[in-house]
Image (tube, rainbow, N blue to C red):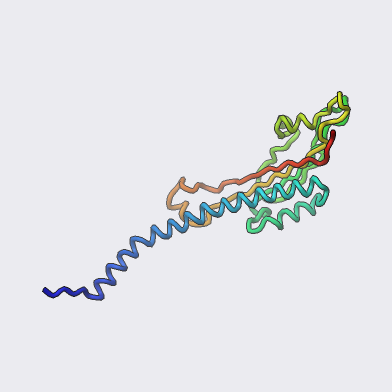
Amino acid sequence: MNRHVTTTGTRGIATLEFAFILPVLCAMIFAIVDIGWPLEARLVVTNVSREGANLASRDLKSGTDLLTYLTSSSSPIDLVGSGKIYVTTITAGTSANSPDPVIASQISTGNLSAASGITTGATDLGLTGAIYNHLVYNAANRVADILGVTVVEVFYQYTPMTPLASFIPGLLGAPTVIGSKAIFCISGGL
């Protein structure tokens, strides 16, 4: 018996195996990219919100300078074209006649149509009850527990980068908004 495999046959089998494995490898690579990129975007959004609230609460940056700094520090994501940043300053109640905290200022930048959760019409201005209560004027102490807070909200719309989402609907979803909010005390009360 003479067994011999032709080179052409071996190449044909290798090509067939490659044709079966290539879509699986591409799908794995696309999945890694489409899962890794939003994780990175989430980290950037969280860091930008924390950094912004920290800088604003210490008066190191303010107004449009702060917004410009935050958008430039958000690389590799684009918070101007696909995001929104809100910086809100809330001051504490100042007297028994004005015990409730108020929104002193709110500035924003970015093209994403995401609404701020910090608004005059929201319950407790959009803050947690505990933070809001620390901003309410305390008649017994003749001052609020804290004099104010700076809130930085950052939103980013993630859109899948690879065509995998169009091949497997519902797997990676449509564009998703990633958001983060950081709250820092402006200065101490008691």
Q: Residue at x 70, y 32 (%)?
A: 128
Near-viewer residue (77 or 129): 129
Q: Classify 60 as above or below 136.
A: below
Question: The C terminus lies in which quarter of the figure?
Answer: top right
The outermost residue toward the front is 190
Determine the image quadrant of residue 186.
top right
Q: Classify 81 as above or below 149.
A: below
Q: Is residue 169 left or right of residue 123?
A: left
Q: Residue at x 68, y 47 (%)?
A: 154
Q: Residue at x 63, y 45 (%)?
A: 179
Near-viewer residue (98 or 167): 98
Number of marks in picture? 0
Q: Classify 53 as above or below 164.
A: above
Q: Is residue 62 left or right of residue 24?
A: right
Question: The N terminus lies in which quarter of the figure?
Answer: bottom left
Q: Residue at x 76, y 47 (%)?
A: 54
Q: How far from the left and from the top, in percent, is residue 30? A: 47, 57
Q: How far from the left and from the top, in percent, is residue 125? A: 74, 33
